[in-house]
Image (cartoon, grey):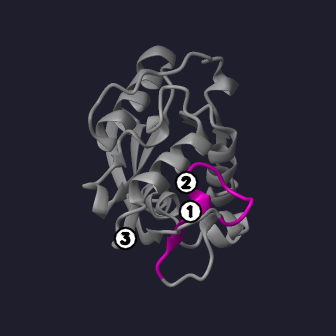
């Protein structure tokens, strides 16, 4: 079965592909000839996932799913949240985002945070949402060379490593995206 994962992000696509059952053929936006950046104009993670999934269904008539993820930091009242990718500006610079986050947390004792992923699935003319959350905290400095986004400064509860210190197979056992994907995969297996 073919299913479109509405992303241009190669790291995210590889992470999802590693978890997905092999009897599914996953296609990225590039694979279906969709090269435009789908605007994320909603003010919620759920809303942005829905926009992307609906865009693919409307314009390409293909079953698809899209995700949106936000890092929510308690001491920053949930920032960066829905603006995680653009926290330091519209150019989506991971390093600048991390620097801004660490600067904003310098005077804070509570560094608790969570990653939240919402997946919107448009499948056989129905839409379903799946949510995955990973609780943890923000480190004081970057650790590790794997992953992307905020992985180098996020450490999940019950782990001694940042996400960026983990091999993909290890991260896939803990991550917010893996949890949401498990719900999606369980649904598709019905």
**Residue 183 falls in which quadrant of the image?**
bottom left
Q: Are marks 1 and 2 in contact (CB under 8 Å)?
A: yes
Q: Residue at x 34, y 66 (%)?
A: 108
Tell me if residue 80 comes above or below residue 61 in the rendering.
below
Numbered-mark total: 3
Q: Secondary structure at mark 2?
A: loop
Q: Please provide the residue range marked out in magenta.
A: 143-157
Q: Are marks 3 and 2 in contact (CB under 8 Å)?
A: no
Identify the mark at residue 112; answer none if there is no mark.
Answer: 3
Question: Which residue is labeled 2 in the image?
Answer: 150
> Is residue 116 among the parts visible in the rendering?
no
Q: Secondary structure at mark 1?
A: helix
Residue 90: x and y in percent read 48, 26
Q: Secondary structure at mark 3?
A: strand
Question: Which residue is labeled 1 in the image?
Answer: 153
Q: Residue at x 44, y 24 (%)?
A: 57
Please check the rendered image and state whether residue 142 is part of the magenta-colored stretch, yes or no: no
Quarter holding the C terminus is bottom left
């Amino acid at each position: 079965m073919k299913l479109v994962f509405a992303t241009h992000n190669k790291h995210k696509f590889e992470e999802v592909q590693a978890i997905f059952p092999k009897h599914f053929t996953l296609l990225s936006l590039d694979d279906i000839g969709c090269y435009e950046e789908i605007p994320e104009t909603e003010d919620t993670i759920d809303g942005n996932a829905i926009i992307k999934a609906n865009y693919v269904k409307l314009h390409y008539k293909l079953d698809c799913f899209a995700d949106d993820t936000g890092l929510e930091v308690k001491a920053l009242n949930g920032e960066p949240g829905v603006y995680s990718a653009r926290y330091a500006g519209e150019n989506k610079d991971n390093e600048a985002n991390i620097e801004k986050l660490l600067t904003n947390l310098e005077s804070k004792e509570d560094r608790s945070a969570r990653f939240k992923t919402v997946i919107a699935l448009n499948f056989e003319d129905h839409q379903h949402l799946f949510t995955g959350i990973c609780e943890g905290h923000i480190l004081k400095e970057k650790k590790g060379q794997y992953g992307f986004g905020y992985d180098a400064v996020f450490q999940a509860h019950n782990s001694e490593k940042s996400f960026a210190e983990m091999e993909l197979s290890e991260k896939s056992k803990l991550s917010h995206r893996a949890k949401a994907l498990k719900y999606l995969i369980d649904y598709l297996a019905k």
